[in-house]
Image: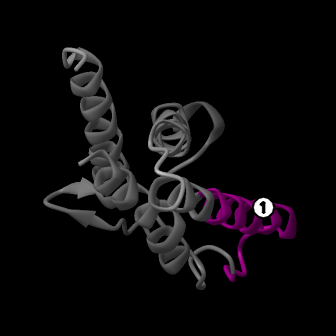
Amino acid sequence: MKKYIVTLSVLLYALVVPFLEINDTHVFNPDWTPHAKIHEVWQLITNSIIGVLCLWLVWIKKETKISAILSLIITGSFLIAFIFQNYYGGSMKYLDGSEKTLIGINIGILGFGLAFVLIVSTMLIEKLKPNK
């Protein structure tokens, strides 16, 4: 079960996020400074490559622990950035004031929050299982 949860997490940060951000709201946003854009593209490439590594570890090497930890770092870092957004002037809202939500919750918080909780829960359940 853990490899499917890690895979879901990876698909969110390695495929869905780039799909949502390689457009005029992020990477090609004319209101963003070139410096912010390079950090955005760097983050997208880094997370996607880490995602490929995680999938290779899970499905080829049969190693889920390292993949789970790397996925927790990526999803958890987003959640921390969201929590502290007011301290650095961040926002999940676009310049026009709109925000991508599902059932009234920001899609980033919903997706990464769910992925984070599922991975942690799976790891805890696995740790609590009696050794065979």
Pick the residue in front: 121 or 117.
Answer: 121
Task: Indicate left or right for 71 with 119 as reference.
Answer: right
Pick the residue in front: 107 or 128.
Answer: 128
Q: Which residues are magenta?
A: 28-50
Q: Residue furthest front?
A: 132
Image quarter hosting the C terminus = top left
Q: In the image, what residue occupies the spot 59% across and 65% down?
A: 52
Task: Indicate left or right for 40 with 130 as reference.
Answer: right
The answer to whether 76 is drawn above or below residue 49 in the figure is above
Magenta: main secondary structure equals: helix
Q: In the image, what residue occupies the spot 68% across and 76% down?
A: 27
Identified by mark 1, the residue type is Ala
Q: Position of residue 53 (x, y in %)?
A: 62, 58
Q: Is residue 48 visible?
A: yes
Q: Position of residue 127 (x, y in %)?
A: 30, 19
Pick the residue in front: 82 or 126.
Answer: 126
Q: Position of residue 71 (x, y in %)?
A: 49, 45
How many neighbours does mark 1 have within 10 angstroms: few (below 14), some (14-19), or many (20 or more)?
A: few
Q: Position of residue 21 (x, y in %)?
A: 55, 74
For residue 49: magenta? yes
Q: Quadrant of the rendered structure where residue 108 is?
A: bottom left
Task: Indicate left or right for 15 with 129 as reference.
Answer: right
| Mark 1 residue element | helix
Q: Quadrant of the rendered structure where residue 99 is?
A: bottom left
The residue singled out by tag 1 in the image is 36
Task: Indicate left or right for 98 with 20 as reference.
Answer: left
Q: In the image, what residue occupies the spot 28% across and 36% down?
A: 117
Q: Is residue 95 visible?
A: no
Q: In the image, what residue occupies the spot 45% across and 61% down?
A: 59
